[in-house]
Every structure is written in C-alpha cells, then in structure tokens.
Amino acid sequence: MINNMEEPVILYNKIPQLVQVPDEEDFSTKTIFDFAKLRNKKVYTHHTIIGTQAATAANYAVFWIAPFACVLNEFRVVFQTAGTDAGAVTLDLEKLTGTQVLDAGVSMLASTINLKGAINTVNTATITTTGANRSLARGDRIALDDSGTLTSCANVSVTAEFIIS
C-alpha cells in the first residue's frame, strides 16, 4: 500500500506507473506519473503542412511541446512538390525555450534540408552535435523554420524522433 491507497498500476506495460498521492493542501488526491520508467525510450512526433499551404511561410510554426526532457535523435522530411524559386529554399528544425518567438531559437540540425531537392524522397537530416541545441527540457517547443521563397512547395511532412532523458 502507498499512503493507504491501492498499489501502483502499470498501464499498457510501457506507460509509467500511475500513483495516487494525497494532496496535503486540500486532502484530495493527485495523479502523478513515474517518467523514470520511460528513460531511454523513443517517442515520435510528426507534422504535415498540407497541399499548397506549404508555399506560405506563415504556416511554418511550432508543432510540438516537449512533455518531458528528451534529446532529438532523428529528423526526417519529405515533400511532394519542390520549391521553384531561383534562390535557396530550405527547412530547419528550431528549438524554442521560454517565451522565444519563431526565428529566435537555435537550430537542432547541423545543416538545413533543401526543399528544392528530389520530391517524394525521405530526407534524413544531420542532427547538430551541440548537446544543448538538440536537448529539450519539459515545456520547450520545436518549430519548422523556412528560408527562401517557398513558391510551389507542397505537402511537406516531417517526423522527429526523440529519446526520453
């Protein structure tokens, strides 16, 4: 028994233990999770900018808030229609902390993804070797950061793989 409550319950074998603990202020109960059991597990998040919405820079924004401390392990991008502007058209993954606005964070990649490359081909980005830039604390956000003129870009999909730390 834990604090005169029932034994912890394991949910779905891979989910952290659910424990009821009394709240000393109002004598009710709170639910807490033991995230330590998830350490070194992989989690994935994905995002797609559908159709021609990918040709509008304002559609590249925050798409995930870290619910726990984790480290970026892999980032993949695929697009259905490449950019056609004469200049460079690229995509970056940006880490935002606190109240940082878009474009004020740090890159989580060693180099950007070329959105003028081969269509329908999964591109695996090179992750930065700077540990602080690839690590997220609980509440940090990740955003897509575009550069160049996105003319013709369409159906941009990304997947980020994190390891819980």
Image: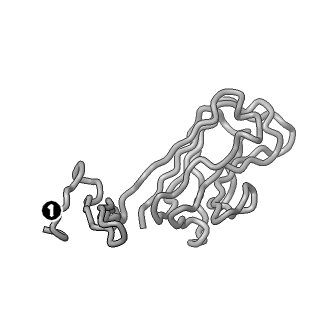
Residue 96 in the figure: left or right of residue 45: right
Name the residue rendered at 74%, 61% in the picture. 104
The percent position of residue 143, horizontal first and vertical second, equals: 64, 51
**Disc 1 secondary structure class:** loop
Residue type, label 1: Glu
Name the residue rendered at 71%, 28% in the picture. 52
Residue 136 in the figure: left or right of residue 22: right
The percent position of residue 81, horizontal first and vertical second, equals: 69, 30
The crowding category of the residue bearing disc 1, from other C-alpha atoms within 10 Å (few below 14, some 14 to 19, many at least 20), is few
Tally of marks: 1
Between 121 and 151, the one lying in front of the other is: 151
Give the residue number, with chain letter if any, for mark 1. Answer: 7
Image quadrant where residue 2 sits: bottom left
The percent position of residue 83, horizontal first and vertical second, equals: 76, 35
Asked if residue 117 is positioned above or below residue 92 in the image, the reply reads: above
Q: Quadrant of the N terminus?
A: bottom left
Farthest residue to the top: give it.
Answer: 51
Name the residue rendered at 66%, 27% in the picture. 51
Q: Which colour scheme is used?
A: one colour
Name the residue rendered at 49%, 59% in the picture. 73
Image quadrant where residue 101 sits: bottom right
Asked if residue 120 is positioned above or below residue 64 in the image, the reply reads: above
Image quadrant where residue 96 sits: bottom right
The percent position of residue 149, horizontal first and vertical second, equals: 83, 40
Q: In which quarter of the image is the C terminus?
A: bottom left
Farthest residue to the front: give it.
Answer: 26
Farthest residue to the right: give it.
Answer: 86
Between 93 and 38, the one lying in front of the other is: 38
Between 157 and 39, the one lying in front of the other is: 39
